[in-house]
Amino acid sequence: MRTIIDLPQEQLAALARHCDVHRISRAEAVRRAVDRFLKECQPEEKDVGFGAWKGRKLNARAHVDNLRDGWGRR
């Protein structure tokens, strides 16, 4: 899929130099940059659920007891 982006002249010049050094197209350089960005922005697995229950009015002890009550029943 194509996309259009606007880059400042300084970034465009730096990108051109990078592409020349690595002998890749501008499109390939941008694909690699986006791939790297997305990998770096992924939340760590331990942080995925952090805050998921924020704002819920819940008595944690009562909730756990309720869950445990259901384990013994079939």
Image (cartoon, rainbow, N blue to C red):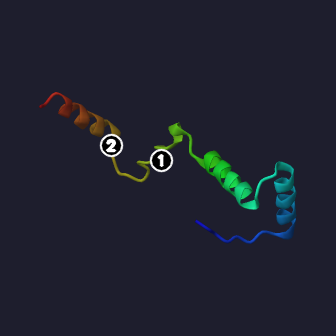
Which element is circle 1 on?
Answer: loop
Q: Nearer the viewer, residue 13 or 54?
A: 13
19 displayed left or right of 54:
right
54 displayed left or right of 21:
left
Q: Nearer the viewer, residue 67 or 8?
A: 8
Q: Residue at x 41, y 48 (%)?
A: 53
Query: Any mark on residue 14, and which?
Result: none
Mark 1 residue type? Gly
Q: Nearer the viewer, residue 8 or 23?
A: 23
70 displayed left or right of 61:
left
Of the 4 image quadrants, the one containing the N terminus is bottom right
Give the residue at the far top of this rendering: 72
Mark 2 residue type? Asn
Work out whether 3 lies above or below 41: below
State the CA–CA distance, disc 1 to disc 2.
Answer: 16 Å
Which element is circle 2 on?
Answer: loop
Query: Any mark on residue 51, and which?
Result: 1
Residue tagged 2: 59
Q: Residue at x 37, y 52 (%)?
A: 56
Q: Residue at x 46, y 43 (%)?
A: 49
Provide residue 37's location: percent of width, then percent of height: 66, 51
In which image quadrant can residue 62 be found? top left
Q: Residues within 10 Å of mark 2 (few under 14, many from 20)?
A: few
Q: Earlier in the sequence, mark 1 or mark 2?
A: 1
